[in-house]
Image (spheres, rainbow, N blue to C red):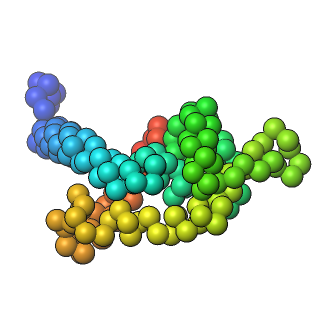
């Protein structure tokens, strides 16, 4: 017998699941949009006395070994020209040095100074000990949130990773 175009039960469930997923995802994104400015404000407030910003902290945390500036731009998902501004600030603060690539003079590597390595190690304690936006979470909840957010963070920006 030919179908009259009525949706099957499976189709109705699939659509309902898609709508629920979209609604839940929208709520999650709304929460992230609320939390992230609070996190940035917290970081900026705690780093104020050091003359650093949230972006400086993020860049400093991202620099590993001699790192080409274009790799830092990729890691931070920003335009390479913006990394130049960030590198200028970090260099002025004495946290990094620019070094020429050994075989390609066009490439500049960012290298942590001794002060930069100390900051990279000590800043998490300065930022996250005591009152902070995540202090309301129990240790297990914080760990669970880390594990959950690592999944979408690992997705390619223009694709979807397998669950």
Q: How many marks?
A: 0
User: Which residue lies at the image location 51% right of the left edge and 58% below the top edge?
Assistant: 61
Q: Is residue 69 left or right of residue 35?
A: right
Q: Is residue 23 left or right of residue 160?
A: left
Q: Quadrant of residue 60?
A: bottom right
Could you tell me residue 40's position as x and y percent?
33, 47
Could you tell me residue 42's position as x and y percent?
29, 52
Image height of 36 relative to 144, above or below = above
- Please name whichever residue, 162 or 57, is drawn nearer the observer in this view of the structure: 57
Q: Is residue 17 left or right of residue 54?
A: left
- Please name whichever residue, 122 or 133, is drawn nearer the observer in this view of the structure: 122
Considering every residue shown, the one lying at the far front of the view is 49
User: Which residue lies at the image location 10% right of the left edge and 28% below the top edge?
Assistant: 6
User: Which residue lies at the image location 63% right of the left edge and 48% below the top edge?
Assistant: 91
- Please name whichever residue, 59 or 73, is drawn nearer the observer in this view of the structure: 59
Q: Tell me if I can see residue 62 in this picture.
A: yes
Could you tell me residue 49's position as x and y percent?
40, 54
Could you tell me residue 120's position as x and y percent?
52, 64
Considering every residue shown, the one lying at the far top of the view is 4
Quadrant occupied by the C terminus = bottom left
Considering every residue shown, the one lying at the far right of the view is 103
């Amino acid at each position: 017998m030919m179908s009259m175009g009525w949706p099957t039960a499976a189709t109705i469930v699939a659509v309902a699941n898609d709508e629920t997923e979209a609604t839940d995802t929208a709520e999650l994104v709304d929460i992230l949009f609320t939390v992230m400015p609070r996190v940035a404000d917290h970081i900026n407030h705690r780093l104020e006395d050091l003359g650093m910003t949230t972006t400086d902290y993020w860049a400093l945390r991202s620099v590993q070994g001699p790192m080409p500036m274009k790799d830092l731009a990729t890691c931070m998902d920003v335009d390479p020209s913006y990394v130049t501004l960030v590198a200028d600030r970090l260099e002025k603060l004495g946290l990094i040095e620019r070094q020429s690539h050994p075989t390609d003079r066009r490439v500049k590597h960012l290298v942590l100074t001794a002060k930069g390595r100390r900051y990279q190690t000590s800043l998490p304690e300065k930022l996250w000990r005591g009152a902070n936006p995540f202090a309301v979470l129990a240790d297990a909840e914080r760990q669970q949130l880390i594990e959950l957010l690592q999944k979408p963070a690992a997705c390619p920006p223009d694709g979807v990773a397998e669950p």
